[in-house]
Amino acid sequence: MRTPDSAPVPAGPGRRTVLALPLAVGAALAVGAAPAQARTRPGADERAPRLEAVAAFDGAMPTGVTVSRSGRIFVNFPRWGDDVPFSVAEIRDGEAVAYPSREINEPDTADPRRHFLGVQSVVVDAAERLWVVDTGRIEWADAPYGGPKLVAVDLATDKVVRTIVLPASVAGPRSFVNDVRFDLTRGYAYLTDATPDGPNGIIVVHLASGESWRRLNDDPSTLPAPDFVPVVEGRPMLNRPDGSSAGTPIDIGSDGIALSPDGEWLYYCPLSSRKLYAVRTKDLTRSRETRVRVHDLGVKGMSDGLETDRAGRIYAGDIERNAIVRRDPDGTYRTLVRDDRLIWPDTFSIGYDRNLYVVANQLNRQAAYNGGTDLRRKPYVLYRLPIGSGPARR
């Protein structure tokens, strides 16, 4: 890696509400295949903030980024086939350094509780702890028990202070826990399960006890849209691991996730979709048997990561347009920036410096989607852009 030269506002949904139903009943809610056209206010593109490169990576491909209150930047590298010397790193003096230690970054499947196996994202919470989301899967092999987990590192001491192992009934060997958001006020964490071969859903973790459970399991809002084929960099994106393959749809469910500043709303989206959804967090936590009312927030574009700021605005990638969009509390979507350098905007993080950070990692250029030929061109880049608001951590 190298380094190149207000008060919270509730942000409740403003569109139609649907009831979470079994798949056979609710399949009609799935988004169609037409390309996204985010509604933008006049002149939004002309006033777009400047995209600034923060760091470049010449080795493994990063997916996640998070920024602490003091400005420390952490990233992660999934073990999908690249040479990954360490899965979690801090950027120090322009270099990616194994964090919190080299030892914990050794992918030891014989001791999965104490090692990072397949880290998918990293998130700093309001108490200045770095949480590591470990899928437990190395190059798509099944995860051993103890592999799927949340690991908390105290940034004051750089020591692991908590490990929450997800039981097999919540995250089995084929699960792919993707991203997480924390509500320390209410005492819960929420994760998306983006398992490519299912099931998809939301995982809720009670932080005090470590108990966890699944909600919206294979609900239409957490599933990939049927026959979804995005057009990225002008080409249909399909699973096509070899040149003789005609390709199949990339069916990846609930992926991006964000929490409103007041903690009342959880936002999420399948990767294989252009839709944004929301649910009340109390419907996820107060009872595990009641139905959950799903709010359809319309079309925002195909997105990987999501994030919210203190003003209650939701940020998302629009992968097909090399863009970043924002949903304002009144329900309006606007394009913040379009830039050809934003090749697969992945994870978002908002810093206390009032910048939005995003990794552009060229995920669509991997060999699995291009007939076995890796089309990625290093470096991968971490960008930021000013947004005039801080993070919505609570």
Image (spheres, rainbow, N blue to C red):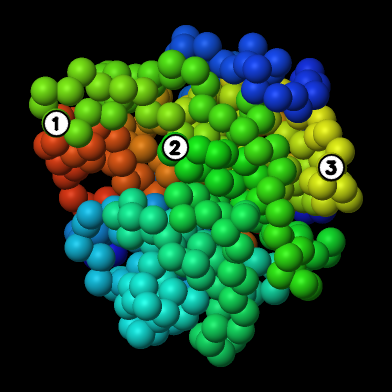
Q: Position of residue 203 (x, y in %)?
A: 66, 51
The kind of residue on which mark 3 rests is Glu
Q: Position of residue 334 (x, y in %)?
A: 59, 25
Disc 1 is placed on an element classified as: loop
Disc 3 is placed on an element classified as: loop
Q: Nearer the viewer, residue 198 or 93?
A: 198
The kind of residue on which mark 2 rests is Asp
In space, the residues marked 3 and 2 are separated at their CA atoms by 25 Å
Q: Nearer the viewer, mark 1 or mark 2?
A: 2
Res. 20 image quadrant: top right
Is 337 left or right of 179, judged from the image as shown? left
Res. 165 image quadrant: bottom right
Q: Is 129 drawn above or below residue 176 in the view shown?
A: below
Q: Is residue 134 visible?
A: no
Q: Position of residue 64 (x, y in %)?
A: 44, 56
The kind of residue on which mark 1 rests is Asp
Looking at the image, tell me whether mark 3 or mark 2 is earlier in sequence order.
2
Looking at the image, tell me whether mark 1 or mark 2 is earlier in sequence order.
2
- Tag shown at residue 197: 2
- Tag shown at residue 289: 3
